[in-house]
Image (tube, grey):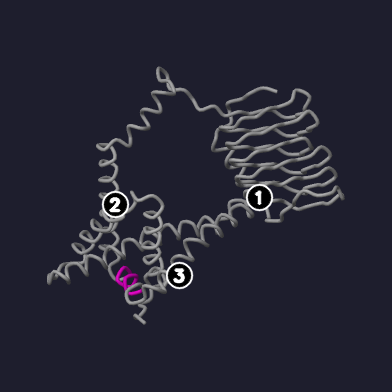
Amino acid sequence: MKARQGKTAATILLVIFLAGCVPALFTSGASDGSVYPSQFLIGETYILESGEWIEGDIVGIGTNLTIRQGARVTGDISLVGSVLDMAGETDGDINVFAGTSVVRGTAFIRGDINQVSHQALIDPNARILGESNTYIFPNIPGEGLGKGVNTFINLFRPANWIGLLAGRLFLFVLTALLVVSLFPEPTKRVVAGMEGNLAPAWGVGIICLLVLPFVSIILIITICLSPIGLILLLLLIASYIWGWIGLSFLLGQRLFSWLGLEQSNEICTVAGAVATTVFTMLIGFIPLIGFLLNLMISSIGLGGVVFSRFGTYNRKPD
């Protein structure tokens, strides 16, 4: 076997997540010659006993996977942040990102071992027909690991952090202003979709945020980069941003109405976008709670986009 740096981390991760799997679980038990379909494993411990087969691939996230001597996998074994104890056979590759692996002397691997940020202990008696491809992050000439870590930490110094926040604020305000200027009426319909219907909009938005990414990834994985899954993800991202813009527009309107002032749509949008961005930045510093609050707020805007049918339908408040 030889180590090779030709394969990149992105390639290995792509191999891992393109493995088509269905959620059928197996557990440890007596050897009965059972044959299982492809597996998608999350957490816990799974053991493939001697005489048991997987007709397909295994994909695992944060799991402890044991392949006993006499057990066989006909496809690839792809793991992220997991522990692998391999003593059986696989006809495909072993793709691992983070975690640890032990390949015992009885193991028979007909494919390659591709690993990134992973520790593997391979018995010299193990039969591996392919190659062991280990991705090593390239070193920057003249800079050691310590200096690289310091450079990364410097990004979070107050001055740099304020610069990042200011850049984010500028981008969002500019995007919001552009969208409202080009699509004033559709944006008003998005606002109408959430105004007076905050609870339903919140519920629909939460469902979309939790379900659509999962559905998109399943479509992409099972249908090999399905354009439907990619389009669904792009629509979700666009709707998420448009929802935040709608919330900013609504907030700006309410703010100037409270002050007894009448302003144009553009000025309302800029004022609302600045207030919204600053508020979400501040609560984002609260561990976990800040993320959840931002998620709940953003779901209202996303629900408004859905209720307005992407700005084509003027939904009246209930």
- Pointer 2 local density, CA inside 10 Å: few below 14, some 14–19, many at least 20: few
Percent position (x, y) of residue 33?
A: 86, 49
Of badges 2 and 3, nearer the viewer stands 2
Q: Which residues are magenta?
A: 186-193
Of the 4 image quadrants, the one containing the N terminus is: top right
User: How many marks do you count on the picture?
Assistant: 3
Q: Earlier in the sequence, mark 1 or mark 3?
A: 1
Of the 4 image quadrants, the one containing the C terminus is: bottom left
Query: Which numbered disc covers residue 257?
Result: none
Residue 218 is inside the magenta segment: no
Mark 3 secondary-structure assignment? helix
Q: Amino acid at mark 1?
A: Leu
Q: Amino acid at mark 2?
A: Leu
Q: Earlier in the sequence, mark 2 or mark 3?
A: 3
- Magenta: main secondary structure equals helix
Mark 1 secondary-structure assignment? strand
Q: CA distance from mark 2 to mark 3?
A: 26 Å
The residue carrying mark 2 is: 282
The residue carrying mark 3 is: 204
Percent position (x, y) of residue 132?
A: 67, 28
Q: Amino acid at mark 3?
A: Val
- Pointer 3 local density, CA inside 10 Å: few below 14, some 14–19, many at least 20: many
